[in-house]
Image (cartoon, helix red, strand yellow):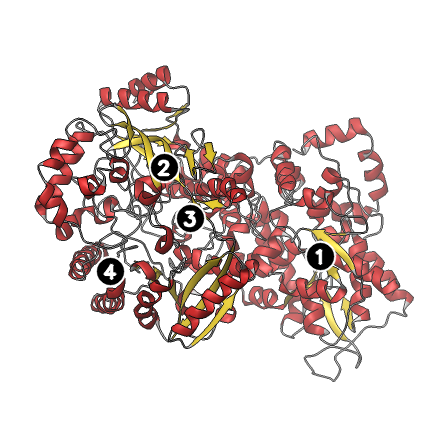
Amino acid sequence: MSDLEAGLRKVVRGEVAFDVTSRALTTMDASNYRRVPLGVVAPHGAEDVAAVLEVCRDHMVPVVARGGGTSIAGQATGTGIVLDFTRHMNRLVSLDPEARTAVVQPGLVLDRLQDAAAPHGLRFGPDPSTHSRCTLGGMIGNNSCGSHSVAWGTTADSVRELDVISGRGERLRLGQGWSGAPEGLRALVDGELARLRTGFPDLPRRISGYALDALLPEKGADVARSFCGSEGTLGVVTEAVVRLVEAPRARALAVLAYADESAAAEAAAGLLPYAPLTVEGMAADLVPSAAALPRGGAWLFVETGGDTQAEARARAEAIVRAADVVDAVVVTDPADQRALWRIREDASGTATRMPDGSEAWPGWEDCAVPPARLGAYLRDFRGLLGAHGLRGTPYGHFGDGCIHVRIDFDLLSDAGIGRFRRFSEELAEIVVAHGGSLSGEHGDGQARAELLPKMYGDEMVGLFGRAKGVWDSDDLLNPGMLVRPAPLDANLRFSVLPRKPVDVVFGYPSDGGDFSAAVRRCVGVAKCRTTSASGPSVMCPSFRVTGEEQHSTRGRARLLHEMLAGEVVTDGWRSEEVRDALDLCLSCKGCRSDCPVEVDMATYKAEFLHHHYAGRRRPAAHYSMGWLPVWLRAVARTRTAWLVNALASLRPLARVAKRLGGIAPEREIPRLATETFSRWWGRRVEERGGRILRPVREGDASFGDGLHTVALLWPDTFTEHLSPAVGQAAVRVLEAAGISAVLPRTRTMAGRRGRVCCGLTYVSTGQLDRARRVLARTLDLLEPLLDRPVPVIVLEPSCAAALRSDVPELLPDDPRARRLADRVLTFAEALEQLAPDWTPPRVDRPAVGQTHCHQHAVLGDAADRRLRQSAGLEGELSGGCCGLAGNFGFEKGHFGVSVACAEEQLVPAVRDAGEGTVVLADGFSCRTQLGEVAGVRGRHVAEVLAEGLDA
């Protein structure tokens, strides 16, 4: 390895990485397979690629080209050198609107090409569901398709020319008429014309094997087209000329409902004469909520286009009239269409979990049959699943006869792996019997290449091997794929994980208490690698700032996987590589909702930090900010807030305090309130005569005074000590709505004093033993109320999220934790549920701001949207994350990333807001970030409504 690394560093301008982190990040793609590479190279250009191939050929080390790492059959993994094109070779070289072509580098993400083509009314035709992170090089390697293939075909249909370096080191320009063909390829084809004319099934989604039939003279001897789908086994693409298509000016989406998936499948082929843009199918068990869909058990998403909205709608309505459906709806609003398409695009992740929460895996993800045979094939497929005792949920490109499915294979036991092999062999025979292709989109890779003789026969597969030899005589490129493949049940990524549950603190209830199962949730679909936050989504803010895989949710999950495996990351919980990758995780919890498989990296980070620092000294920030509730309560007890504020205003003292506390020097120390919220509330009660509300009737579980509903108002650390004005405003609004707020007691039934706390700061810094003690004391304080249906209103979204999710997961054996979590209401939820007849004051002003990331991920903001609408606060709030994220943005070394996160959506929205616009920010962190970065005062919605009451 040292000779290889030295040889590469000598000739490569780009990065050469043989470190633990780089290797661990590339052991897997989105498949069931895992291979450990020797190193990773990020080439700067074609010269670097050629140099890598030459050095690796000299050392007899294999090379695998990798794009977004979203391949589902294992072809983006390798044991030699991985070429990462996403870092440098990711440019759109040129775009010619008149010729409708673009020149692209292999690492260019598809959405970036679409963004550049859109102003010219153009687009790249193929659009896989991973369009926000897959690369053009990967699409060429897999011959990717996507939902619009019924209109615009596959990637091979969109490729004009390819610049390629073959396995033998030749630089070739591939095109039609044998252009760029390596020596010996034409002679090989001329000797096998009859076989090539008869040996390939005729269907729109035939991706399996090499497309040698594209080299037939009657097909233009198109070497570029033949290269597509070769999975990096013939050569490495360094540049491509691709064809663009005219995008419809207007679109309509007809959602057709059927009784079940078989009925939808049988109907799909009959819609093709109407020239739709898509015919996508999915069943009810993949839909989190069917509320937005017409009634039925399965649906076809049929998109139509036109020059005008009326034309597109008319075409969609014609399809509805022609289709024999249970129900249907035509959607023309672009936002509503995007919401529906998100349901379909997330299916690749959603399908990895069965309705009962058990795991499901790829492997038979995308077989394709002639569209007219789809219904019959699905019935046989379902029958085979039943015969093997397996479950799966088909969905996908019904108009092309291509089905995606995740199946609940047991890939952890020998018996389960044996069943995986037997099922695979029998399903391959069923696919072939229906005239289909083992792969209809994602390629063969390791998952299916072993079974290609069932589809093509031994002689055609032998011809594939001879073609591989022409291009890559040394078997340098991606060996074990397509030709001389590795067994389909070898190199499974789960085999290296511990068989016994890992000793952890959180309960992981959705994963059976197994941390390994929680880490296995990440299947690599890489939605976290999107380069811009779309709509309300949050995940993954640190990746969008750095662009580094290790700062994506997937990258961190991969490192945790390798930590558990112990082969690449060898020092377990003490791993500095894992710690460094998690360091820039904001614990925003965006992945908990935006990741299709609900990876919760904030929880994994807290778990890791707990073990990593067990028995040793922690960073200063863990003591200064992790123990923030303790320090602030001490200040409140001694009534020295005025003194702390005065000292903090002296810059030399503030600099020393920040240095000692591990706080970023660029940050201002927040001012403390001289009167806490609890003191204000107590003084207010005394002024009102000290009246205490009791149960309406003796022994009654409901509280009130006959006129008011009583709710517990949670005095979170931020409202209590830093922004009591928010609590005061909330009390006024709640009382106006007929809700009387009371604060928790400060003495347990056993007489011990204390304050309630959600434990958030201890959790976020991984001090989980301390968090559990704090939460146990909190439950002791609240115990008299937990047997009664008293709602708990929490004003700070991060604290509400901690109470609703972290508390029951940290104390899974304490039934009081679940009862508390079930009582938690946000401010908007409280007004809606406890005062349904109350009408908020009309503010009638535009509003900007950002939905708190924890609210987006854990709590939901539907009630907040309705409250803003009722109050006349118009406008959509931004997505993304403010970047301060509790202690994250205050920690030394995080300031640049923190501000960059804010500058993505929040700060630009506030800067562009017109005069009189209300800036909403329910979270203390969000308000602090707005004040420091944008110089704007954000307000909690309670403050805005309280002002409305005055008006």
Q: Is residue 380 left or right of residue 726?
A: left
Q: Secondary structure at mark 2?
A: helix
> Which labelled disc corresponds to residue 755?
1
Residue type at numbered disc 3: Thr
Residue ID for mark 2: 137
Q: Is residue 419 left or right of residue 905?
A: left
Q: Earlier in the sequence, mark 4 or mark 2?
A: 2
In which image quadrant can residue 755 be found? Answer: bottom right
The answer to whether the residue labelled 3 contacts the one labelled 1, judged by CB atoms less than 8 Å apart, is no
Q: Earlier in the sequence, mark 4 or mark 1?
A: 4
Nearest the eye: 142 or 270: 270
> Which labelled disc corresponds to residue 370?
4
The answer to whether the residue labelled 2 contacts the one labelled 3, judged by CB atoms less than 8 Å apart, is no
Marks 3 and 4, how far apart at CA: 24 Å
Marks 4 and 1, how far apart at CA: 67 Å
Residue type at numbered disc 4: Pro
Residue type at numbered disc 2: Gly
> Which labelled disc corresponds to residue 130?
3
